[in-house]
């Protein structure tokens, strides 16, 4: 599986039967110069919660590519009324798609959707355990450290995508604790340095993690998960 980083919490996952984006906040990201109109074959878009830096360019890309949006029930039903193709799930649920299994996991955060000048409910924020071509990726979404992460140890995660920027999510110290809970083989830090308030040094995180490999990806850099 090929994993490409687009900054903040945005990743592309490419497998034999899927080309997916997770939380594609790209055109609004001051640190990312990727032209969103170039995406023309995205099969699935995962959205972890309703905040703008996660829904991001999802709708524009989904409309263009006829992608299926995978998200919680509340965000999904809202998008269904707008004509989008959605597959809704909820926390603790697992579903087998043609590309592999997906499990929705809890996140400790908010999920309001800013819509026409007010916040509407986006249900609960989530993370995803996504299996593609026999590899398991955990995208934590935006979350604080939770004891629930200890349960992910049994999932045998190959790659964990974890926020480290603090203020809205885990900071480096808590993200290191989460690595010790989850015990993934490899970790990629995310949700840092996009804005001043989530400033963090990914190399400090790398030095502090002792129980997993840490791969710090630059924006637009990819990583082959073998
Ligand atoms: Ni958020
Ligand atoms: Mn966020």
Image (cartoon, grey):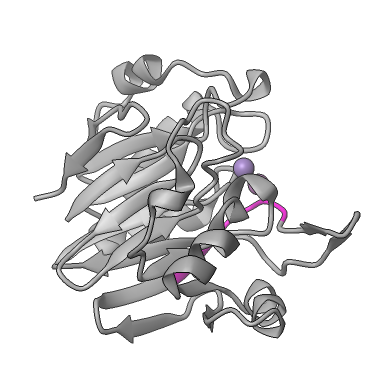
> Does residue 35 lie above or below 72 as drawn?
above
Residue closest to the eye, 165 or 1: 1
Residue closest to the eye, 22 or 39: 39
Residue placed at 51% from the left, 42% from the top? 26
Residue 105 belongs to the span the image colors magenta: yes
Residue closest to the eye, 53 or 132: 53
From which residue to which does the magenta span run?
104-110
At which x and y percent is residue 45? 45, 65
Residue placed at 67% from the left, 66% from the top? 124
Q: Is residue 134 left or right of residue 72?
A: left
Ligand 2: image quarter: top right
Task: Specify the quadrant of the image occupied by residue 29.
Answer: top right
Q: Residue furthest left?
A: 226
Residue placed at 19% from the left, 63% from the top? 15
Residue placed at 29% from the left, 56% from the top? 13
At which x and y percent is residue 163? 49, 38
Q: Quadrant of the N terminus?
A: bottom left
Q: Is residue 183 visible?
A: no
Q: Is residue 8 left or right of residue 3?
A: right
At which x and y percent is residue 93? 47, 80
Q: Is residue 138 left or right of residue 213?
A: right
Residue 209 belongs to the span the image colors magenta: no
Task: Specify the quadrant of the image occupied by residue 19.
Answer: bottom left
């Amino acid at each position: 599986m090929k994993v490409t980083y687009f900054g903040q919490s945005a990743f592309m996952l490419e497998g034999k039967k899927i080309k997916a984006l997770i939380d594609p906040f790209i055109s609004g990201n001051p640190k990312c110069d990727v032209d969103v109109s170039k995406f023309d074959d995205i099969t699935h878009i995962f959205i972890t919660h309703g905040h703008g830096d996660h829904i991001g360019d999802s709708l524009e890309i989904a409309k263009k590519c006829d992608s299926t949006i995978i998200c919680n029930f509340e965000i999904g039903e809202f998008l269904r009324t707008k004509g989008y193709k959605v597959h809704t799930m909820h926390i603790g649920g697992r579903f087998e798609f043609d590309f592999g299994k997906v499990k929705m996991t809890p996140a400790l955060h908010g999920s309001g959707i800013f819509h026409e000048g007010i916040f509407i409910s986006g249900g609960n924020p989530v993370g995803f355990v996504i299996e593609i071509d026999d590899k398991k990726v955990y995208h934590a979404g935006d979350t604080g450290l939770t004891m629930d992460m200890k349960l992910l140890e049994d999932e045998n995660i190959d790659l964990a995508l974890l926020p480290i920027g603090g203020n809205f999510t885990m900071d480096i110290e808590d993200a290191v604790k989460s690595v010790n809970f989850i015990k993934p083989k490899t970790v990629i830090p995310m949700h840092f340095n996009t804005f001043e308030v989530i400033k963090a040094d990914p190399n400090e995180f790398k030095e502090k993690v002792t129980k997993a490999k840490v791969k710090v990806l630059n924006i637009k850099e990819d990583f082959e998960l073998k």
